[in-house]
Image (tube, rainbow, N blue to C red):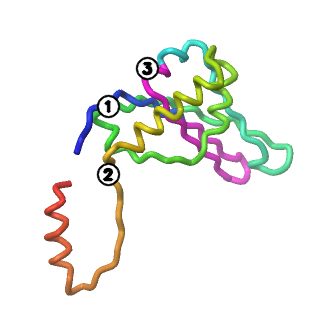
Amino acid sequence: MSTKTENLIVISAHAEGYRSGAIEYEECYLTQEFYDSIKDSINISVWVSELDGKHSECEADIEIKTLKNEEINNFEFEFCGCERIVDCLYEFSDESYEIVEAELKKAKDIIKNLDTTISYEFKAKKSQRKLVAEFIKTLNI
């Protein structure tokens, strides 16, 4: 089941402690339409504290990626928090808090309703291997 949807924007922030190697990662999803309306007024700069201990601070690498309709159903969405990115949207966009929240919810609802590909792991007896393989073929993945 593939549904036509608008493009989505993935904004990700990845920070790694210089000494410790500790990692902090977050992703935020926006509709293409909303991102295009705010991209000239926002400055996404994320700093992460205490990855290398007390009083340390690391700047995160920011990546902005467009997911076109044909890529969306195969993308592995990670809902791992996006507080720092969202703070930048509130601070630098000309939109109100309520509009930003509504747009974040709109993108999340689009993702929630997608028929995305998922990985599924289970255990079966060796004697059932052929039966499992035949069942998987019926799924037309």
Q: Provide the secondary structure element on which disc 2 rests.
A: loop
Residue at 34 percent across and 43 percent down: it is: 114
Circle 1 residues within 10 Å: few <14, some 14–19, many ≥20: some
- CB of mark 3 within 8 Å of CB of mark 2? no
Whichever of labels 1 and 3 marks the residue nearer the N terminus, that label is 1
Label 3: how many residues lie within 10 Å, few (<14), some (14-19) or many (20+)? Answer: few
User: Residue 59, percent across and down?
Assistant: 69, 35
Vertical placement of residue 140 versus 108, above or below:
below
The residue lying toward the viewer, choosing from 77 and 6, is: 6
* Residue 15 located within the stretch drawn in magenta: yes
Mark 1 — residue?
A: 5
Q: Is residue 116 left or right of residue 46?
A: left
How far apart marks 1 and 3 lie (CA) works out to 12 Å
Q: Amino acid at mark 2?
A: Thr
Q: Which residue is mark 3?
A: 33
List x then y, in percent, for residue 88.
66, 27
What segment carries the magenta color? 12-35
- The Cα–Cα distance between marks 2 and 1, rounded to whole angstroms, is 16 Å
Q: Nearer the viewer, residue 12 or 57?
A: 12
